[in-house]
Image (cartoon, rainbow, N blue to C red):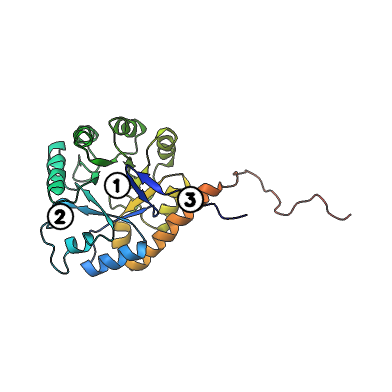
Amino acid sequence: MSERVDEPLRIGKHSFLSRLFVGTGKYKSVDETRQAIEASGAEVVTVALRRVDLKDRGAGSMMELVTSKRWTILPNTAGCYTADEAIRTLRLARELGIADLVKLEVIGDEKTLYPDNEQTLAAAKTLVHEGFTVLPYCIDDPIVCKKLEDVGCAAVMPLAAPIGSGLGIRNPYNLRIILEHAKVPVIVDAGVGTASDAAIAMELGCHGVLMNTAIAHAAEPVLMAHAMREAVSAGRKAFLAGRMPKRLYANASSPESGLIE
């Protein structure tokens, strides 16, 4: 039997073969960032607009790297605490020609970095109306995800655990409910710590995983980026294959029928 061919991940008018999205922060250098992105096989790279010099396109700069047309840029609004801040930030990015597909992030608390659902929804409504393709970072709440989808977001990005925590998938049951009802891609965003976390997200049926710290803060970031690439691929294949049912008791691997008496 031939291997099943997977469909591309489609978000708005965009189509991607890789289901791993990666960030660009926290690396030791721009060169290490480049090596990690390449090792990850990611086609989408997210950039925190408020934490880089958007006008510096000089040799060796972060903006030179991410605007090299090798990847689709996903500008994000990390560091924004109100809908107005996020909207202004993405409008500026659009003026600079780097905002079509955007990650909306409106933080509600400095310590946990949990998103502000009310402000996120308000910003999403405005940005969708203005023609942005919006991917919102949100709590793993099925109701919030449904509301974001209803206002026109092209995907939803529920967290697995707090940003940068590396705790992995804390609530697979909420993710399953979100996946059951969503008609747009569901991309796990935040909290992944190692390859098995990424694989679990994909095995649940998530359409993609976005990560930064798990790769950038690994002892060997480039090697971890490669591991994450394989984990996302393996998890997706396992989901498509369909796992065996779980049983309380043993079930012999070798069939008993047909045995010679």
Indicate which disc residue 113 carries.
none
**At which x and y percent is residue 65?**
21, 63
Residue 217 in view in this figure = no
Number of callouts in the render? 3
Question: What residue is at 41 percent from the left and 63 percent from the top?
Answer: 227
Q: Earlier in the sequence, mark 1 or mark 2?
A: 2
Residue 68 in view in this figure = yes
Q: Which residue is mark 2?
A: 51
Question: What residue is at 41 percent from the left and 58 percent from the top?
Answer: 195
**At which x and y percent is residue 176?**
44, 38
Q: Which amino acid lies under the numbered mark 1 shown in the image of this protein?
A: Pro
Q: Secondary structure at mark 3?
A: loop
**At which x and y percent is residue 226?**
39, 64
In this view, the residue in front, 29 or 14, is: 14
Q: Residue furthest front?
A: 13
Q: Secondary structure at mark 1?
A: loop
Q: Earlier in the sequence, mark 2 or mark 3?
A: 3
Q: Secondary structure at mark 2?
A: helix
Rendered image quadrant of residue 28: bottom left
Q: Which amino acid lies under the numbered mark 2 shown in the image of this protein?
A: Arg
Q: Which residue is mark 1?
A: 162
Q: Which residue is mark 3?
A: 6
Q: Earlier in the sequence, mark 3 or mark 1?
A: 3
Label 1 to label 2, Cα distance in Å?
A: 20 Å
